[in-house]
């Protein structure tokens, strides 16, 4: 039957070449026997339509041939959880390394241009894709080796105990029970933790770009700032550096949490510490009574001197109010935290 | 196919997968070639697609559970399979396991 020959020819193209003649001969014998039975049952040859329906029911040639190939996962279910963990870890690490290197290159010598910054951002998908490709390739090799040689060659525990995912893990290597974990609140997701780091990094880039591109902060208002007779005092540079430094500190800490796999652990004392340190930039501003000055004091002192004095005093008082509110809020949070700790200790003692 | 139907189909295939090897091993205590084996299983209510059964025979043979030989029958060369000595041993163990599972499931129902 010509249709059967064409079918077998198509199957042959996808069979493993070392065994294709043998497999094909067996398949032909089986299918021809089946065809004979069908024709004997009908008392006639199959019509082209019936033959087509019969072969269609057997399935596409490529699918049939694929079943003769060695059964091999690219990354099987035993390895997949570890692969997924490593992939996330490696992608994050690559993103951080790339971001740091890009930031250093962008800020080396001069302020970055918008074009170079966007160029660096647009290269991120390529970096992530390359990382994912390498990780996948390595794990495909591991899967292949496990399928061929078993798991005996693997080190006892290649992965951090906190992951609890090493192939030869032990219950005692699992991390201890997290204390003070809120039971009624959904823990933050990994995606959210990664997003916080990424947006934190972007915020730092934005902050660093402001001196070169003030419109990023003031928008169209930059025109009025340039035309106005007032200018910012150097204390604002110190203030800006503190803000950048604090953000770098926070993002770094979040990053370390991510790498340690501790992003789900609530750290109320750390949050309080960040808020306390966050008061320093306000204190820096308050320490200087003069925050704005005249660009041309000889020319404008008489006209704008009183206004400038009023602006300086108002901003200074405003900063004092901000400091008072933030300080009270901080004290309240410390009080709540201390009370909670006391209650928990008392409950544990009972 | 709805999600529920799809889920059922996946679970059904998963359930069947292990049983098919056992059924094939059981049937190959007597010698068969691919097509007669398929017919014999179908007669006992276990329909298996050609694209599943024939590659499965090769796999079981590669695992040392079956032996095979080419022989002429009805003027056609056919590959006949039967259980190897290792296959008989594994089949006995699998059968015991299957009966234990079956008994457990029956006691649960």
Image: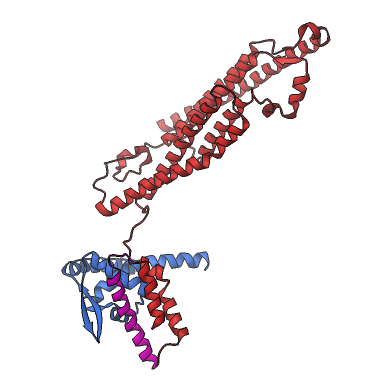
| Of residues A175 and A232, the one drawn nearer to the viewer in this rendering | A232
Observer-nearest residue: A21 or B33?
Answer: A21
In this picture, is B78 found above or below A303? below
Q: Residue furthest right?
A: A303
Left or right of A338? Residue A283 is right
Position of residue A144 measured from the top left corner of the image (x, y, whole percent):
31, 52
Q: How has the structure been colored for display?
A: by chain
| Residue A54 in the image: above or below residue A342 | below
Residue in the picture at 55% in, 31% down:
A201
Residue A120, given in percent of the width and then of the height, sits at: 55, 35
Answer with left or right where residue A223 lies relative to residue A98.
Answer: right
Please indicate whether residue A129 sits to the left or right of residue B16 in the image.
right
Quadrant position of residue A274: top right
Q: Is residue A21 visible?
A: yes
Residue A36: say if magenta: yes
Q: Which chain is blue?
A: B
Q: Position of residue A227 (x, y in %)?
A: 78, 20
Residue at (76, 24) in percent of width and height: A223
Q: Which chain is red?
A: A
Decide which of A182, A125 is in the foreground and name it: A125
As drawn, the residue found furthest toward the bottom would be A43
Residue A269 location in percent, x, y?
Answer: 50, 26
Q: Is residue A278 above or below residue A262?
A: above
Q: How many marks?
A: 0
Tell me the magenta residue range.
A15-43
Q: Quadrant of the C terminus of chain B?
A: bottom left
- Location of residue A301 (image quadrant): top right
What residue sits 75% from the left and 29% below the top?
A220
Judge whether residue B19 is colored magenta: no
Please tell me which residue lies in front, A220 or A185. A220
């Amino acid at each position: 039957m010509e249709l059967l020959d064409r079918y077998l020819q198509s199957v042959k193209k996808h069979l493993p070449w070392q065994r294709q003649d043998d497999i094909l001969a067996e398949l032909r014998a089986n299918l021809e026997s089946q065809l004979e039975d069908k024709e004997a049952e009908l008392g006639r040859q199959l019509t082209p339509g019936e033959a087509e329906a019969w072969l269609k029911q057997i399935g596409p040639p490529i699918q049939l041939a694929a079943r003769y190939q060695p059964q091999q996962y690219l990354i099987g279910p035993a390895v997949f959880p570890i692969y997924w963990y490593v992939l996330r870890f490696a992608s994050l690490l690559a993103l951080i390394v790339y971001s740091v290197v890009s930031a250093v290159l962008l800020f080396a010598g001069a302020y970055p241009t918008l074009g170079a910054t966007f160029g660096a951002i647009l290269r991120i998908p390529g970096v992530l894709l390359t990382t994912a490709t390498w990780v996948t390739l390595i794990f495909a090799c591991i899967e292949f080796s496990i399928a061929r040689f078993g798991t005996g060659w693997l080190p006892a525990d290649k992965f951090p105990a906190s992951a609890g995912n090493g192939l030869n893990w032990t219950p005692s290597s699992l991390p201890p029970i997290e204390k003070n974990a809120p039971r009624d609140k959904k823990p933050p997701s990994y995606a959210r933790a990664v997003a916080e780091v990424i947006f934190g990094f972007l915020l730092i880039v934005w902050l660093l770009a402001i001196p070169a591109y003030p419109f990023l902060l003031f928008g169209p208002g930059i025109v009025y700032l340039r035309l106005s007779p007032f200018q910012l005092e150097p204390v604002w540079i110190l203030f800006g550096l503190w803000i950048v430094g604090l953000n770098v500190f926070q993002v770094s800490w979040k990053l370390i949490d991510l790498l340690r796999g501790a992003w789900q652990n609530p750290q109320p004392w750390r949050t309080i510490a960040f808020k306390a340190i966050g008061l320093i930039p306000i204190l820096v501003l308050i320490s200087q009574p003069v925050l704005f000055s005249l660009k041309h004091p000889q020319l404008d002192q008489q006209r704008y001197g009183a206004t400038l004095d009023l602006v300086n005093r108002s901003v200074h008082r405003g900063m004092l109010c901000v400091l008072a509110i933030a300080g009270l809020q901080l004290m309240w949070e410390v009080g709540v935290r201390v009370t909670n700790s006391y209650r928990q200790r008392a409950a544990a003692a009972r | 196919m709805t999600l529920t139907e799809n889920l059922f189909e996946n679970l059904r295939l998963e359930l069947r997968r292990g049983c098919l090897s056992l059924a094939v091993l059981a049937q190959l205590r007597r010698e068969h070639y691919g097509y007669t084996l398929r017919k014999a299983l179908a007669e006992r209510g276990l329909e298996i697609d050609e694209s599943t059964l024939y590659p499965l025979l090769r796999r079981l043979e590669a695992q040392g559970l079956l032996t095979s030989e080419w022989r002429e029958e009805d003027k056609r060369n056919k590959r006949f399979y039967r259980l190897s000595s290792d296959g008989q041993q594994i089949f006995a163990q699998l059968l015991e396991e299957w009966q234990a599972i079956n008994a457990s499931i029956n006691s649960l129902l």
